[in-house]
Amino acid sequence: MLPEARLPAKQVFAVVAGNALEFYDFVTYAFFAAQIGRTFFPSGKPGASLLASLATFGVGFLTRPLGALIIGRYADRVGRKPAMLLSFWLMGIAMLGLPLVPSYAAIGVAAPILVIAFRLLQGFALGGEVGPNTAFLMEAAPPLRRGFYISLQAMSADIAVMVAGIVGIALAAWLTPGALDAWGWRVALLLGVVIIPFGLVIRRSLVETLHRGPPAPAPAAHRTPYTRIAMVSLALMATATTTNYLLNYMTTYANSTLGMAAQIAFGATAVIGAAGVIFDPLGGWLSDRFGRRRVILIPWLMLAAFIFPCFWLLEHFRTAPALYFACAVLASTSTLAGTTALVAITESLPRHVRAGGFGLIYALSISVFGGSTQFMAAWLTQVFGSPLVPAWYMLGVLALGLSALVHLRETAPVKTGRIDS
């Protein structure tokens, strides 16, 4: 049993900073994909540089499962602290290296090779970051506040998305197109690197949580339950990830499918991010008081009920208030359930496989389901010619998640009376 002492705020910051940097880099790279493409992948064909830049961004997803497996197993065998230090070091090298790579015009084909190498390294580091971080937060938090502490991981991502959007919009407004191509995008990426040294210093002071509590049971004795837990967790995470990426698609959907003005469509991102900042910790807090299953089930049922009315509202009115109202409703219910699913999955996994298991489930969900969601939504909309395709897509993945929830046991100490780690 862990003591009820509150985890110092600076240590919480050091842990969740890696997750925040992941999403800051994600949004910033996407925002400046055109500039990065022209810098490293010059081409005479219209759009070819942008496609090459986006493809390079995508290769980072390939190494996430590998990082989750290797660094996660390291965290489960040696400790959470050394694993978090290792992943943060690798992330810092990759995030610093990419914006410092000279242009194609300066060093030729070595430029895109280096960019791809840094993206692969960053994907590996990020894949290995989330498992040890989440395991540490669960094990170091007071047992009756685990949900709230783990929810800070998700909240940090939404804050980072908002910051990245502000930085991108500010640079685009202040700099000329030539300056953005030459060095503006590099400044945006390097701003995230500033956090790395502070995170490393604070992480060195973290306590080790791996060996707290009673010894873990032998893996062979629970092989079948582990398989069931993994399958249920993967389905829950796939649902949470897909609904989140569909919400992130709302900006493109509003602009491309509904024909709304770009400045109105971009506001959807701000609304979704703000909803996440509010409802991430609220979901964790509610799950600590009322249990994990209930705070997943009720919001997902509400989301399923709200999907078609919200999309009907968008299709018929196509105004800024309709867009922002629909995004706020969908994002708040999705966030409450998705954040709580993270907590339930983490608590379901035994301590000796928690970091590697959760990291691998998360990486596979992001790589397989999250990475394909927006492409599939856009492609299916073109195939069927209906603006309601994203609504049907979201409803389908919710059916998957609700089916898996039936097989998820309650893990909240307030419901089970168990506070072991």
Image (cartoon, rainbow, N blue to C red):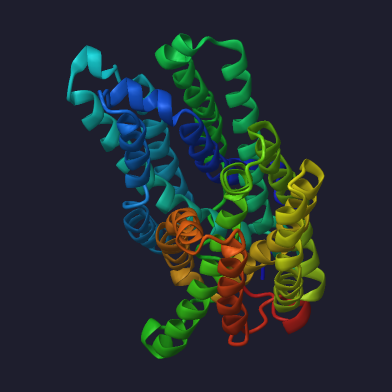
Relative to 74, residue 170 above or below: above
Percent position of residue 369, x then y: 45, 63
Percent position of residue 49, x then y: 32, 29
Who's the residue at 35% across and 20% down the image? 100
Closer to us: 149 or 214: 149
Q: Quadrant of residue 279?
A: bottom right
Percent position of residue 45, x then y: 27, 28
Q: Is residue 3 visible?
A: no
Closer to us: 329 or 75: 329
Relative to 82, residue 342 above or below: below
Relative to 38, residue 341 above or below: below
Which of the image's four quarters has the C terminus? bottom right
Percent position of residue 310, x then y: 75, 60
Q: Quadrant of residue 33?
A: top left
Relative to 40, residue 117 above or below: below
Judged from this view, the residue extending furthest toward the left is 109
Which of the image's four quarters has the N terminus? bottom right
Q: Is residue 392 visible?
A: yes
